Image (cartoon, grey):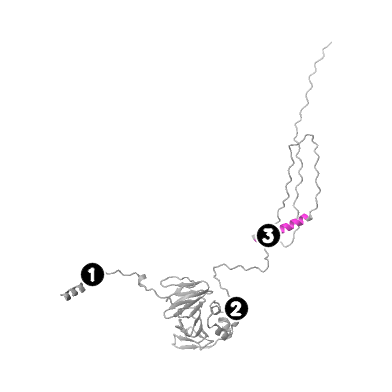
Amino acid sequence: MPLLVLFLTATTLPSCTISQPAKPFSSEALPTEAIAEISEIRSYPVRVKYINSTSARPATVGVPLKANESVSTEDSSTAQVTLKSGAIIRIGGSANLTLKPQNQVEFESGRLVAWAAKDSKAPAQIKTSFGEISSNDGTLYLEIPAKAAEERRVIALDGTVTVLLKSTSEIVTIGKGEEIRIKADGKATPPKRIDKEGIDKRIANNALIFGFSTQLASLPQITSEFGVTATVKEASTIQFRRSDLPNKPSEPKSKPAYTSGTANSDRREETYDRRREESTAAKPAEPATTAKPNNDPTPTATTAPASPTPNNPQPTPITTDPSPKPVEPAPQPAPLEPPPQPVQPEIPAPEPPPVAPKPKN
């Protein structure tokens, strides 16, 4: 009997369960762990394209990066990505870098410098369209032009770099100070020592090598190998600023010469004062004017002479004509005369009375 009860219970319970609705896509996607972060941005713009995002967004320092997320730069911008394994990846020059699992990165175009210590958790591994590049005890430089017909370059700045070519499955080992060129067909030239022209163009004054505040651990070996010690001293004084921020105004060594605009207000006042002094010195002294005697016997006590208008000459405008022109003194107002007396109407004389006729005798 107990066995029968158990059997019936086991068969009826599944039919009583309620079917759960399907979970949405956002809850089904398991969160992935960040494997890298943007540790430094030396010049903008730098953008990040996150998972399940259709467009890239502006990047900031400290942003964690997950697998299949990408970082892009423009021709004049540079950025540094630090992997959890300890490897350092620097990109610039219209570059596009995508993070991959197992501490790998995929690089499509631009310029790249990668460094990984010998005791790191994983070597610096870069996947490209022509093959895979790795180095676990040095520094490598990679240059991939945007045009597929142009040659790609791989330089071992320090240590040893290996390249696995996709077209021939050949492994090429590059020693310190050597480079190889990969042609459009995927084949590589034999490793050879980089010449002076290549050092001056791709190593000396390279912003990916010397333009960051955090120096590479292999920097002393690189400068000693290629003889670019002077560049390292200059690199400590390089200052990078965002392009969208206003530049700090530099203090002029001498007082600037103003030519036009509102900045010349102080200069106009100075010129006006100087010309007024010259005009006053050149003008002869005028004799004092005597008052005209009043011949009218009628007193005019109610009429007061008006006060003379003060002499306020207008400032002479500044012109760009280099030849000096004489400054004419402003005309002085004539002295005011007393107003004329009102004209009185003439009164006709009274007519004489009529004379009476004399009587006739």
Q: Quadrant of the N terminus?
A: bottom left
Q: For residue 31, which quarter of the picture?
A: bottom left
Name the secondary structure under disc 2. helix
Q: Residue at x 22, y 71 (%)?
A: 13
Name the secondary structure under disc 1. helix
Name the secondary structure under disc 3. helix
Toward the front, the furthest residue is: 2
Name the residue beneath numbered marker 3: 266
The vertical placement of 54 against 103, above or below, is above
Residue type for callout 1: Cys
Q: For residue 11, which quarter of the picture?
A: bottom left
Q: Whole-Å distance between the Cαs marked 2 and 1? A: 78 Å
Is residue 106 visible to us here?
Answer: yes
Region rendered in magenta:
263-280
Sequence-wise, the earlier of marks 1 and 3 is 1
Name the residue beneath numbered marker 2: 234
Does 125 appear in magenta? no
In the picture provided, is 93 more to the left or to the right than 347? left
Q: Position of residue 191 (x, y in %)?
A: 51, 88
Name the residue beneath numbered marker 1: 16
Is residue 153 visible to us here?
Answer: no
Question: On residue 28, which mark appears?
Answer: none
Sequence-wise, the earlier of marks 2 and 1 is 1
